[in-house]
Amino acid sequence: MINYIKIVTVFMVGLTSTLSFSQDEEHIISNAIREISPSYRITENPQIIDTVVKIPQFTYPLLSRNMKTSIQTEEIEASKIKIINKLDKLYPGYIKIGLGTNIMPLGELYYNSTRNRKHSYGIHAKHLSAFGKVKDYAPSQFDQTKAKVFSNYYLSKHIIKSEVNWLNHGYHYYGIKNDSLPKDSLRNRVGAYQGKVSFSNLLRKDSAKLAYTINADYGYFHEFLKDSATLSTNGRENNFGIGTNLSYKHELNVFAVDLDFRFNSFKFGESDTTLLAYQKEEKNHIIHFRPTISSYRLDDKLKIELGLDVNFDLSANTVFKPLIVANLKYSLLDGMFIPYLGVNGNLKQNTFHSLNRANPFINSAIDLKNTKEFKIQGGIKGTLSKTISFDVHVHSTKLTDMALFINDTIFSDQYKFNVLYDDVNVFGIGGSITYQNKEKLKIDAIIDYNSYSTLNQKYAWYLPQLDFTLRGSYNIYDKIYAKLDFTLKGARKSPNGILNPDPTNETQFEADLIADANLHLEYRYNKRISAFLQFNNIANQKYHRWMNYPVYGFQLLGGVTFGF
């Protein structure tokens, strides 16, 4: 044990000597005393101190102070409440009965179905006749009765519409200055029967499906009485049409196609007559095709429509008649002003029915040609305020084979009219303005000025250069209703200068100025009963609508209406 201690001691001394010799000679070695704090033992045992500290309670004195207050109430204006039923009661029937000067009875009937989600139907019939005379002229009595029956049937996705029209019109060729002719002389009576039906699908406004409508109609128009001037012959006509309208919306474009076929067959004279000149058979059939594309741009402010209006006039010399369709309109200031520009055309089918309704005093033996129209127009329409709207336009129109009327000198003493066709160019300007204050007051003013130039005829007979219409309606406390309309047609031309030439008369081609004002007054006792007075031709102007055909002067018509 001692040996081990000696060996360790010698080893440590040797190691210390070696380290001392390896250090720098400037390194200083000194002795130091380092004291260590003595440790002591905690004699107390650890324990948990659980002491509740009592929180002192503080008290504050409350000062009581009363404030003086007052309450004031403001009066509330009593509200006006109109108590009405959710849906007003509907009266399906309406009758109007009246009697006027010139022994003029009036009768009118309306009857409609009430509310129904699956179907609706109704009838409208009207009769008006006059047994008075036009001074110094042949008997001028007339009667006109017409009726219409209509219905709509609603399916889940389709709608079926139908309509039947009937007309019976008796009148006289009174354009002769001879008041001693028998009452039943120079009389005529025509009748018309027409039926229409359409089938179409119902789509939502934003639907992207194909919308279609299929239409079909048939009409028969004829004269009841034989024409004694042409060996007891009369005219009759069959007219038939079928077509469809297709449209499809894709994004901002609408593709549309109109396709229809119209058949018309007119006959005059009997097959066994010996005078072939009094036999006439006219057919004018039309195939119509109109494809168009409409596009909406610039947030729907700009609308452009482009297409063609293609017609095949199967009875004309020029069968194929294509016309351009181009329309443009732009909305300014949120629709306040809408300038527009358009090029359009169509082919109008002239029939014995349409020509007789335009002028009932025409000869029955007529030629039928269809009128081609090509029109360029432009203008601006819009609103000036919430109550005022307007439209101003200018147009240039070319009418090929336009139907004009000229007094006949062969089969009548100028009391009948022949139908002739001419090419007419029209340049016109016009405008309209409308004021409407809710349902209380409404006023419309429409004016057109047209300049005509003809190819063969001297003038465009009986067409007015100036056409002005003013109409208005006024509602006084839902009790008294007033309607006024005024019509002015001027600068018309009459063929009198050709039929009865008078070189000394500078106005021989001037036709009468038409100035006609009418006033209608109605007092409604309640929702079902009312009384009315109607003043026609207030200025008592006995103008000639057609040459040798003056109209009645002032007329007064009064009656009552009843709803049931």
Image (spheres, grey):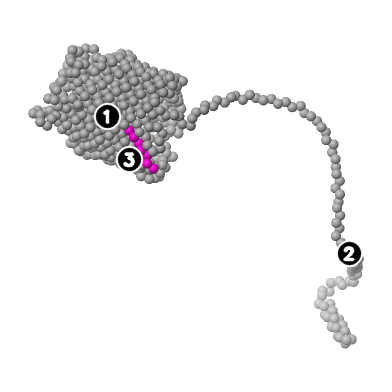
User: Viewer-nearest of labels 3 and 1?
Assistant: 1
Q: Could you classify mark 2 by the number of other residues whose Cα lies within 10 Å: few (under 14), some (14-19), or many (20 or more)? A: few
The amino acid on which the numbered mark 1 sits, given as a three-letter code, is Trp
> Residue 297 location, x and y as percent?
41, 40
- Residue pictured at 21% horizontal, 20% vertical: 172
In magenta stretch: residue 152: yes
User: Viewer-nearest of labels 2 and 1?
Assistant: 1
> Residue 344 location, x and y as percent?
30, 35
Secondary structure of the residue carrying numbered label 3: strand
Report the magenta residues as a range.
150-156
Q: Mark 2 or 3 closer to N-term?
A: 2
In magenta stretch: residue 130: no
Characterize the magenta stretch by its predominant secondary structure.
strand
Secondary structure of the residue carrying numbered label 1: strand
Q: Mark 2 or 1 closer to N-term?
A: 2
Secondary structure of the residue carrying numbered label 2: loop
In 3D space, how far apart are the residues under numbered discs 2 and 3 (Cα atoms)?
A: 108 Å
- Please name the residue that numbered disc 2 is placed on: 45
Q: Mark 3 or 1 closer to N-term?
A: 1
Closer to us: 510 or 231? 231
- Please name the residue that numbered disc 1 is placed on: 166
The amino acid on which the numbered mark 3 sits, given as a three-letter code, is Phe
For the N terminus, which image quadrant?
bottom right
Closer to us: 10 or 393? 393
- The quarter of the displayed image where residue 448 is located: top left
